[in-house]
Amino acid sequence: MSRESAFIDRLRSFASDPAARGLIDDCAVLPFGSRDIVLTHDMLVEGVHYLADDPPEDVAWKLAAVNLSDLAAKGARPIGVLLGYPLGESDWDQRFADGLQKVLAAFDVALLGGDTVSGAGPRQIGLTAIGEVESGAAPSRAGAQAGDLLCVTGAIGAAGLGLRAALRGDEASGFIAAYRRPHPRLIEGRILAPHAHAMADISDGLLIDAARIAAASGVAVRVELESIPLPPGTAQDSEARTTAATAGDDYELIFAWPADLTLPQLETTKIAIVGAFHEGKGLRLFDGGKIVPLPRKLGYEHGAS
């Protein structure tokens, strides 16, 4: 068990309000009349979630996008955000503010307030995003059922390729934007949420996020390696798919879909069926119909040994 998992388990002992959903989701869902208010908070830490020399405008974009992605996984419409910001070098601060203004305008989200502090050391920037959804309509991680299909939107692994390009200084790579400026699937989330039994976003890796849905739902999940959609123009072999499925930072949606219900045709992206849920527990990985060993790491975990 990672230190992150152990700490969250400790918090679960007193996060008893139903809105917390047992801390198995990335969002809290708070009933408010005929609507539910969806709340999420994510942080970006320099050297962990972004590189020290990443442009501040891109850091602002990613900070907003990863929070909005959590709202997308609940099918929520964004209302606004609260920023927690450590003041540092003035030019970096101003460029960050310019980037934040642009990303919030791009997704029609209001800046409602927040807090600033004097910063020192690596930057740690937090954002709280607030959204709304029809009462009872926000799917959790815990609703997958035996027989459901495991599906994902878009292609998997572009952000991992972008990170590797950034680390080697290849600014000409077409994948760097996928790492620095992910696009939350807000429209897709609102289409899928009313019918998906469970849904999350792929932040830490397809395999680990699929396993989390299965564990929260009390079922097992099977992932078909050869069905994982990779970015066009990249290697399409088993090794590339395993790397993509554990890389994280894709912010595509991963969801459990009733097998007897036709998947929608999205105008913005494709949906791929990459596995299924069944009775039991745990994650099994198949390639070409044969079970294969799980990779040593299923994805990213803070405080993992």
Image: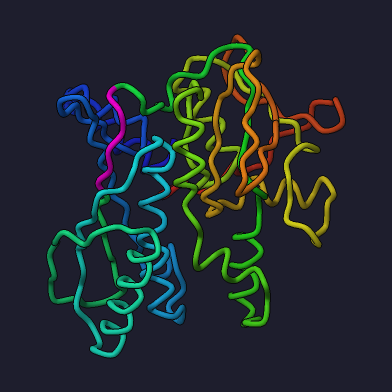
- Image side of residue 238 versus residue 229, left or right: right
Magenta part mainly helix, strand or loop?
A: strand
Residue 228 quadrant? top right
Q: In which quarter of the image is the N terminus?
A: top left
Q: Residue at 60% of width from left, 49% of height from top?
A: 268
Q: Residue at 81% of width from left, 38% of height from top?
A: 226
Classify 295 as above or below 67: above
- Image side of residue 50 versus residue 41, left or right: right
Magenta segment boundaries in residue numbering: 130-135
In the rendered picture of this protein, how many numbered marks are placed on residues? 0
Q: Where does the image place residue 201, in percent across and percent down from the top left?
A: 49, 42
Q: Can residue 153 be seen in this view?
A: yes
Classify 201 as above or below 81: above
Classify 226 as above or below 141: below
Residue 136 quadrant? top left
Q: Toward the viewer: 268 or 247? A: 268
